Amino acid sequence: MGDYRKSALFTIRERLALELAERMTHTRKRVTDKFFKRLQQRFTDEELVELAAVIALENFRSKFNPVFGVESQGFCQLPAVKAAASAATDRFSR
């Protein structure tokens, strides 16, 4: 995710949302009580539920889609992503 914590390109809320995504995505990271309190200072309960749901959905899709060779439809041109999608698709064409 780069150096979003120090970047002037993001607002405080955006940095917190990115950190939440990072904590929800990386296995060894957690959403601690202290961090959750920081989130509650900037987001309503409704916003936190929606944000966590969207992050969880993207995490689900990142694990689910490659199994079935669901590709990015041209939206993500990263070579590693294309190679992984191609490898997943090849498994089904055998």
Image: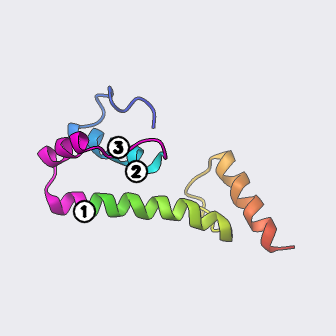
The image quadrant where one finds the C terminus is bottom right
Residue designated by label 1? 49
In whole angstroms, how far apart are the C-alphas of marks 1 and 3? Answer: 15 Å
In whole angstroms, how far apart are the C-alphas of marks 3 and 2? Answer: 10 Å
**Mark closest to the chain's N terminus, 3 or 2:** 3
**Which of pointers 1 and 3 indicates the residue nearer the eye?**
1
Residue designated by label 3? 18
Q: Secondary structure at mark 1?
A: helix
Question: Which secondary structure is most common in the magenta stretch?
Answer: helix
Disc 3 marks a residue whose amino acid type is Leu
Q: Quadrant of residue 87?
A: bottom right
Disc 1 marks a residue whose amino acid type is Val
Question: Within 10 angstroms of label 3, few (less than 14), some, or many (20 or more) residues?
Answer: some
Q: Which residues are magenta?
A: 27-48
Disc 2 marks a residue whose amino acid type is Met
Q: Secondary structure at mark 2?
A: helix
User: Which residue does the image show at 68% across and 46% down from the upper left?
Assistant: 79
Do the CB atoms of the residues marked 1 and 3 lie less than 8 Å apart?
no
**Mark closest to the chain's N terminus, 1 or 3:** 3
Q: Position of residue 1 (x, y in %)?
A: 45, 38
Q: Position of residue 58 (x, y in %)?
A: 45, 60
**Mark closest to the chain's N terminus, 2 or 1:** 2
